[in-house]
Image: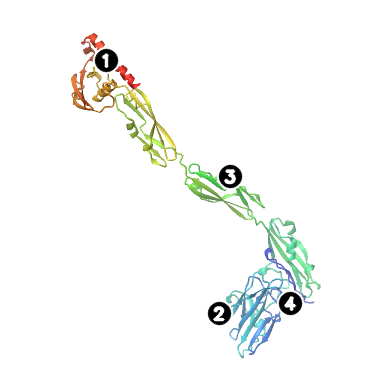
């Protein structure tokens, strides 16, 4: 029975699907990757003896099948008696069109020397030619390629140094070789949204026989799990089968991994503006988001917080980010940042503190300045702003001795025009003993309830218009103050803005009984004339 080699050529990934290889009918074994480590085989090489005869050149007859993006090492076993001098090689694509000339890099290891050759990512074949030198008399038989040279997948000497000579001999191709990278079965990774078609998969499958040549048209499919599940996540097998004219058969399993490659999408509000007094809740921000996945559908309930720089800084002005995330059942994830800008806003009014109610006698002096000195205003942002307080209304100061309850309104604003108001209550009580004026310079006082001071005499003189209001005065002589609780007649001499005013103050134990001794008619007439005149002038002045 003839020896038949059947190979179905596939590909690892969809993005690496090769073009068809145009091959001769009688395709040699080295069209395929070898089973062993060594890519060099006697029948594929010629040895040309040079002059002198210990020099020679090794040249491959056919292309050598290699893997793309792999570092190969070319070495000679008996480096003590021979060495490789120069190396020349080119890379070819799947159509055996030259890609580039490759640079073999010499690497020394003690007395030994080997060459590194790196294949391009789109290479499928190389050709190889190198010069060798043998010591005189060594008689190594350098024309025996398999016994002297090795082209193996390796980065450095340590990769192959422990291999035996048998392991480093060329072992031929795999007769049921499945065309993959790294000696695995064919595998496609495709998306459930846009799956690779059966036509694309099948177009990459080739069947070659060393007798029949290209028998790709004889390939059939004996198992197809993929066709009905192209849009369903999972791994599915397609089994290709071929038979040559001698009845030799081969199969190739191609596995299709249908994946959900698309990440979910989160949508919704991605920015907020607020201030330090109105923080946003994490739940409210999250509730404004939704998530959709191409395969799993609505994933809104699976949205979680990946990081949160806002919540702990909600009352601090600045720009912060919350990153939400969601994953589908294929572990595709999506991050969604939400930006929160916290602006500084001062909407707090200043605060008054101090005394806001006064109860005083009508003969006590309380000024607006006294009231303001007992007030402090503090603002959360501007600090102490008492100096900005102004009077909005004042029903007390223009008549401070009137008996009754009076209001003073204060107002203040901070730099951001937050305004505060405060009302001061002044209760004026009648606690002044009566004063009977018989003459403008004579004052009679009942000792039974005497709390009169000289300042009270002056205020009474101002109200009765004996003297003008608010005149500056000083006491020149005072017999009264130390004797006000002792019956008698006392002299008080005042300096009223340069003019002397003498007062006679009569303190009686019983003012009513003493008064009856005065001529009744004169007393009544003089009293009412003086009294009604003073009362009329007083009320005219205050109203």
Callout 4 secondary element: loop
Residue 541 horizontal/vertical position (percent): 33, 21
**Tag 4: Cα neighbours inside 10 Å, few (<14), some, or many (≥20)?**
some
Pointer 2: what residue?
Answer: 109
Asked which quadrant contains residue 351, the reply is top left
Q: Of label 4 and label 3, which has the lower sequence position? A: 4
Callout 3 secondary element: helix
Q: Of label 2 and label 3, which has the lower sequence position? A: 2
Whether label 2 touches label 3, CB < 8 Å: no
Q: Of label 2 and label 1, which has the lower sequence position? A: 2
Q: Which disc number belongs to residue 242?
A: none
- Direction from residue 75 to residue 174 in the image, left or right: right
Q: Of label 3 and label 1, which has the lower sequence position? A: 3
Quarter the C terminus occupies? top left
Callout 2 secondary element: strand
Residue at mark 4 to residue at mark 3: CA–CA distance = 68 Å
Residue at mark 2 to residue at mark 3: CA–CA distance = 67 Å
- Direction from residue 106 to residue 354 in the image, left or right: left
Residue 511 horizontal/vertical position (percent): 23, 15
Asked which quadrant contains residue 348, the reply is top left
Q: Residue at x 26, y 27 (%)?
A: 471
Pointer 4: what residue?
Answer: 28
Callout 1 secondary element: helix
Pointer 1: what residue?
Answer: 530
Residue at mark 4 to residue at mark 2: CA–CA distance = 35 Å
Residue 155 horizontal/vertical position (percent): 59, 74
Pointer 3: what residue?
Answer: 287
Give the vertical position of 301 relative to 186 (above or below): above
Give the vertical position of 268 relative to 99 (above or below): above
User: Which numbered disc, 3 or 1, marks the residue closer to the eye?
Assistant: 1
Asked which quadrant contains residue 190, the reply is bottom right
Residue at mark 1 to residue at mark 4: CA–CA distance = 151 Å
């Amino acid at each position: 029975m003839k020896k038949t080699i059947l190979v179905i050529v596939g590909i690892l990934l969809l993005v690496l699907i090769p073009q068809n290889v145009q091959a001769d009918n009688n395709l040699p074994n080295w069209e395929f990757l070898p089973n062993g480590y060594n890519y060099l085989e006697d029948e594929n090489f010629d040895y040309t003896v040079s002059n002198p005869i210990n020099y020679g050149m090794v040249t491959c007859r056919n292309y050598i099948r290699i893997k793309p993006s792999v570092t190969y090492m070319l070495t000679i076993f008996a480096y003590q008696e021979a060495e490789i001098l120069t190396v020349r090689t080119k890379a070819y694509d799947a159509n055996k069109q030259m890609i580039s000339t490759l640079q073999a890099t010499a690497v020394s290891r003690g007395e030994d020397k080997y060459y590194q050759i790196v294949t391009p990512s789109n290479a499928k074949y190389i050709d190889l030619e190198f010069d060798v030198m043998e010591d005189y008399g060594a008689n190594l038989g350098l024309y025996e390629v398999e016994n002297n040279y090795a082209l193996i997948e390796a980065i450095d000497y340590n990769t192959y140094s422990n291999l035996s000579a048998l392991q480093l001999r060329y072992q031929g191709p795999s007769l049921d070789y499945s065309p993959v990278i790294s000696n695995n079965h064919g595998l496609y990774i495709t998306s459930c949204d846009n799956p690779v078609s059966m036509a694309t998969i099948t177009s990459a499958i080739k069947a070659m026989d060393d007798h029949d040549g290209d028998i790709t048209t004889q390939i059939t499919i004996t198992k197809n799990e993929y066709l009905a599940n192209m849009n369903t996540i999972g791994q599915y097998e397609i089994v290709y089968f071929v038979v040559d004219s001698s009845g030799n058969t081969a199969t190739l399993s191609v596995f299709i991994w249908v994946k959900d490659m698309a990440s979910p999408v989160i949508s919704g509000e991605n920015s907020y503006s607020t201030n330090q007094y109105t923080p946003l809740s994490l739940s409210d921000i999250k509730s404004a988001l939704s998530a959709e996945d191409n395969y799993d559908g609505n994933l809104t309930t699976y949205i979680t917080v990946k990081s949160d720089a806002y919540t702990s800084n909600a009352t601090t002005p600045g720009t912060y980010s919350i990153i939400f995330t969601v994953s589908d059942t294929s572990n595709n994830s999506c991050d969604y940042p939400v930006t929160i800008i916290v602006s500084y806003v001062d909407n707090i009014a200043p605060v008054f503190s101090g005394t806001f109610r006064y109860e005083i006698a009508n003969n006590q002096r309380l000024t607006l300045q006294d009231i303001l000195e007992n007030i402090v205003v503090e603002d959360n942002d501007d600090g102490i702003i008492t100096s900005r307080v102004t009077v909005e209304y004042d029903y007390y100061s223009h008549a401070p001795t009137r008996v009754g309850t009076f209001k003073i309104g204060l107002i203040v604003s901070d730099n951001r025009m937050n305004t505060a108001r405060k009302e001061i209550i002044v209760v004026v009580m009648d606690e002044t003993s009566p004063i009977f004026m018989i003459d403008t310079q004579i004052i009679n006082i009942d000792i039974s309830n005497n709390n009169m001071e000289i300042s009270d005499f002056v205020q009474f003189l101002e109200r009765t218009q004996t003297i003008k209001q608010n005149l500056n005065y000083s006491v020149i002589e005072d017999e009264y103050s130390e004797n006000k609780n002792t019956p008698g007649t006392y002299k008080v001499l005042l300096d009223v803005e340069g003019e002397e005013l003498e007062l006679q103050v009569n303190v009686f134990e019983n003012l009513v009984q003493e008064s009856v001794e005065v001529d009744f008619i004169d007393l009544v007439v003089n009293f009412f004339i003086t009294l009604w005149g003073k009362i009329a002038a007083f009320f005219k002045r205050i109203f």
